[in-house]
Amino acid sequence: MSRSRRPGRRALSRLCGAAAVLLGGGGLLGMGCSQEPPVGAVAPPPLGAQADDDDACACAAGFYYNNQPIPLEETRCDAFVCGRDLISYQCHDGDDAPDNWVSYPENRCGDLACPAEGTFCGEDVVNGEPAALYLCPGTGQIPLDWRICPGGCEDGACTGEASGECPCAVPPIPGGDHIPLQCGMTLCFPTGAGNAGVRQVCTAEGWRSLGLACNQPQGDCPACRGVQDRSGRAVTTTACGEEVCGLGVGNRSRWVCGEEGWLDLNLPCDPGASTGEGALGRCPVEFRDNDGQWKGVEPGQTFCGDQVFGGRANKDLAINSGELDIRIRGRADHLYACPGPGARPVPYRSCDAGNGLGACTRVREIPPVHRHEVTGARPGANEAKIRDWDRCEESCPPLSDIIHYFPIPGGNNGDDDCRHLFCGQHEVTGRVGTLYYCAYELDPSNRACPPLHPETAVPGRPVPYEECSSGCRFVGLANNSDVCDASVEQRPFGVPDPTPAPSITLECDPILDYQGRQVPARSLRLGSQICGPGGQVLACDERQLSRPDGWRATGISCGTSCGVCGPDPYGAQTPVCAYFASAEGLTCDDASFGERWDPCLNNGNVTFNEPAYCGYNVAGDAEGDPNMLYICKAYCTRSEGGKTVELPCAEVKSAGQGEPPWTREYRLDRSVYCPLGCQENEHENDECKRPGGGKRMAPLRDSRVIREFGVVASDYGGRHLGEDLVSNWSVTAGAEVHPVADGKLLWKGINDSQYLGVALVEHPPKGGTGQRYCSFYGHLDADGLGRDLVAGQAVTTDDVLGKVVRWNDIPRQHNLHFAAKWVECPTSSDDFYCDPGDPRDNSHLHYAVLSDEECDRFDGSRGTTYVLSTPYGYDQCETPVEAPVALTAMTAADACTVPMGGATTEGYISPTWFIEAPPQ
């Protein structure tokens, strides 16, 4: 959106990738996007006094991730730290041997992000473990240490051992006030949308969703990724309803997988028992009825606990389910509801609750009753009995201000009746769809209805009265009895909507942005990037052990007036940014972090209800982040009910109407991070640039640099003229290689050097002016070399040029295409040095960026299949160059003026520079 311009800042993007130092050692490891902070950037917080001698451990040579040493007196056995290689370490008690640091390589800590300074539970830390307590040095920073609570964690403190107490409210279901609630109990809750139902479990935080519809046998809850069990092993299950015993090393509580992730059941961990899906057994397929016949189980049918079911169908189910028999466990004096045949039972109610007499009667023990037989009617010869279920032994609900009984003259064998009819599971237990007869036992002195002396009148027990052909309708308890009604459908307890809840596989957990505002739901999808706490770009990625919330810390700065070239959360600036800051006098401020900072323009020229501005195009004295889009919302004042209120404006004004200025106020509503930059528009809202608009990124996704540009490699005789990349999370061999930026494929093919498969891509100048650049890629597999790409074709960063070849397979593939044969691996030769084997693997991508002139030298080297000449990998100059970032940074030393057969090194450009600071 256009407005008066001020001097803008150069929008710079930044390549992830920095060396990290091993804990307690000096070796270097490339750590990709989780950048190691500089020495002394964050002061290490104390771990606190030792609780007792059992907690005291003395592990030497330990370092926090910020390179600060860990004082020996502040190490303890149950605490974890984030090491300099961004891996979790624990000080291990060596007993008779010296205490030592134990690493958990799969549990990386580079994606953790604190909400503020202080102690926080894992649910408040981005990618935190739910049972852990973290000590945080500041907003957006990585915690330096944490401990696993033995029970759970609430309000910034450990809760201690599991107590078995859960604050679960009375469930909003029929008979919910009679259900004995306990931790770990699973019930079917209505959603309010028709008959839809979802399963909820009673946890330390109350009722929480299991992510399953009530009759859904299984489902995926991907928010449960990213934890360890109490032995330190990765928990890989994401099955909704699955339990683990202990969440994290040292935790001794039970946890269940639900829609929100791992839920604390606040129950002690007992490896020999289970409270999960199979704890109550399995519902039968058939049951023996009170006429001696085997009948099929109805939806929602209730059964007394602690019983085993025979029958051929049940035996077959046991065999197919891998179980010894089909049984409902639990207590014999409790009723359990079955959502369907073979389903898992759910607790319904205790038989000593309400009007219960403390016992549960199985249906085969209840005498069969025919229609209206309880009031004296005689059944026909072939009349079927009324269907019934297991139910509690109970008295009828007593007369009260809420429940009335109604006189029926001659209703029971000619005697006057004082009765009330109840649908099953409405004030009484029993079958849904059956009416139950309740009546007072009246003596001659107490014959009236209601009884003359209610305190001495005795209510009888419910007896089946009539089986409804379809539905049974509840009637006001004080107005009339329940009745059969074909127009209604009574939902049995435990019977769900068959439609499962939507999967959250493609979303990350909700999060606050760097300004403390809730990130919009549309920004929680896989592939989205947001400006997170502390001013760091977080990318929504696949959930892993190190990122259960799904957010990946990129190390890219955001939220400052100089955007992605601002200091990261630890105050460091990349060499490229520092280079341009020095050359151009670039300064950064974080004014947009403040609550009072306002990018919204309030004047009569604004005509939109939700105007949007790029960070370099906002009102006021302080710039925003040039890669952020700030969206404002208009509020109008109006009178409602005699009061003046402010509401979001609904009316629309067209520009140029000549009307008085708006009587409205614009306020910041939300901000959106633009990974590809923000685009200013005339006469319409600014917007984030779309893909294909000049984005530049590393050719291997989620990768790190293992050999930088310009470093001297004595074994190859000179300085490196490109960068070598490997994958962070998987084997590099076979990884897909993408163009570093959009452009045109000049050629691809096979070369007789160690490069093997190669490709050259041309990149036009940004904005259509200036000089072009080219990018070169080597060490590609000859078999999968850009099968769908041809020379001259336009390519984007989404296209695949090929795959990284397995290093030891290069000689074999070379011999398939060239007459001069090499000795094949594992035997090394002068032509090729083979990997000695695990754990070393030299498979990597070599890529370089060339100037326009140097690109011309190699553009004509292509053939139909083979490439005659390729860019050099190394020059012959031993003089190192410090932090080369610009085009001419590789000017040869005097002793190396002709290092490569007449060529100079001036045409080779730092790939990092090309990605981080592309010319405007």
Image: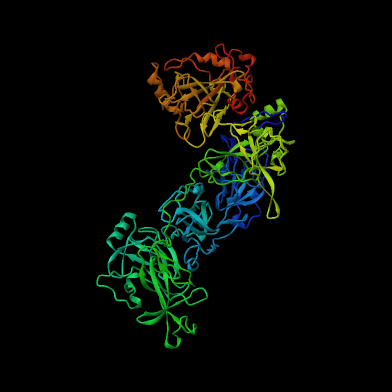
Find residue 150 and report its image quarter.
bottom right
Which of the image's four quarters has the C terminus?
A: top right
View extreme (top): residue: 902
Find residue 910 and report its image quarter.
top right
Residue 515 at x, y percent in the picture: 66, 43
Q: Is residue 910 visible?
A: yes
Residue at position x 61%, y 28% from top?
916
Residue 489 at x, y percent in the picture: 41, 61
Residue 440, compared with residue 855, is above or below; it is below
Residue at position x 29%, y 69% from top?
384
Residue 906 at x, y percent in the picture: 61, 17
Which of the image's four quarters has the N terminus?
A: top right
Report whether 579 appears left or right of 441: right
Q: Which residue is nearer to you in this view: 83 or 557?
A: 557
Residue 548, compared with residue 425, is above or below; it is above
Q: Which residue is nearer to you in this view: 499 or 474?
A: 474
Report whether 860 appears left or right of 581: left
Residue 640 at x, y percent in the picture: 67, 53
Q: Is residue 245 visible?
A: no
View extreme (right): residue: 621
View extreme (left): residue: 381
Residue at position x 56%, y 36% from top?
31
Q: How is the image coloured?
A: rainbow
Marker count (numbered): 0
